[in-house]
Image (tube, rainbow, N blue to C red):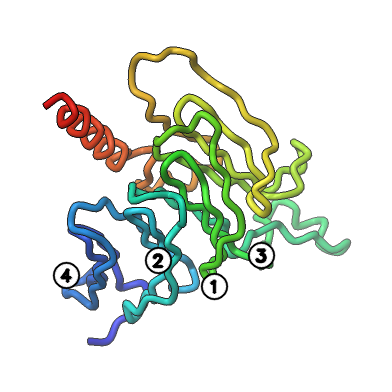
Amino acid sequence: MEFTRDDILICAVKGYVYAIHKKDGTILWEKYIAIRAAVISVYVSDNDRVIAAAVGATHSIDLMTGEIIWSNNMTGFGYSEVSIVATPSGTVKPLQLLEDEVDKLYLPPHYETVTQDQQIIIACSKGGALAIDFNTGDTLWQYDCPGGGYNIPVAIIEPPNQKLGRQTQLAYVGSGRCVYCLDARTGYLVWSVSLSWNVLGSGYMTLASPWSSKLAAETNTAFSQNPSAQAANKKRTKDKNNDHKK
């Protein structure tokens, strides 16, 4: 069956990642990556890669064929659910107007795409964040959130902001009661803040910013809006505690 990247809908359930045709639901390919009980997070890049993560591992899968390109087993992160975000493969900026175009200021600006030197995946699990090279699957850096515990962190990546004096892309990671601001390229801790000292109530954090909310405005699924994996982890912890009481 012939199809293009725009025909594909990616679904993940019961340990498998599926590519199905948007027109009639035909299964184009399927790939087993995790145990059936796993919650699989997925992300599709603009260079035809499916990033799928579950039970402490992250995989890159060819969008068109279902072939696994690489796997990163996220050493030290156990077998919990994984949340994933990625730096963009390119950014857009307005082109500078030429002198003879000054009278066209009322027109919408033209844009050019600026390719990023290196695209990075940030996979979060078990109170920490792991940066993975998008092309090779190699680990670039790891940050264990102090006070993050065994929570599943959530992350937001934002572009450089000259107004705020930010020359590099930053990753904001929330885990437990703390938020950590990291340099997305190096893992360097820019700042951190503890938001609550309350020991009662839920410790699952969600994050949002005007930029990230604008990108998510087309009702895309994300961990911060739909924390299904966190809910699964909460149930697992409750069952574990009940087992200890027996």
Q: Residues within 10 Å of mark 4 (few under 14, many from 20)?
A: few
**Where residue 59 is drawn, which disc sits there?**
2
Image check: 15 left or right of 200? Answer: left
- For residue 25, the mark is 4
Mark 4 or mark 1: which is in front? 1
Answer with the quarter of the image where residue 133 lies.
bottom right
> Does residue 237 appear in this view?
yes
> Dot 3: few (<14), some (14–19), or many (≥20) neighbours within 10 Å?
few
Label 1 sits on what residue type?
Thr
For marks 2 and 3 on the same chain, the one whose residue lies earlier in the sequence: 2
Marks 2/1: CA distance? 11 Å
The spot of residue 109 in percent (x, y) is: 68, 57
Disc 1 secondary structure class: loop
**Amino acid type, label 2:** His
Are the residues flagged by discs 4 and 1 in contact, CB closer than 8 Å?
Answer: no
Q: Toward which corner of the image does residue 111 lie, by quadrant?
A: bottom right
Looking at marks 4 and 3 on the same chain, the residue that comes earlier in the sequence is marked by 4
As measured in the structure, the alpha-carbon distance from the residue carrying label 2 to the one carrying label 3 is 21 Å
Picture disc at residue 136: 1
Distance (Cα) linking label 4 and label 1: 32 Å
Between 156 and 210, which is closer to the camera in this rendering?
A: 156
Dot placed on the residue nearer the N-terminal end, 2 or 1: 2
Q: Could you tell me which secondary element the residue under label 3 belongs to?
A: loop
What is the three-letter code of the residue carrying label 3? Gln
Q: Is residue 195 above or below residue 94?
A: above
Residue at position x 32%, y 54% in the image = 55
Q: Report how far apart the C-alphas of labels 2 and 4 lie in the structure.
A: 24 Å
Q: Which mark is residue 116?
A: 3
Q: Quadrant of the C terminus?
A: top left
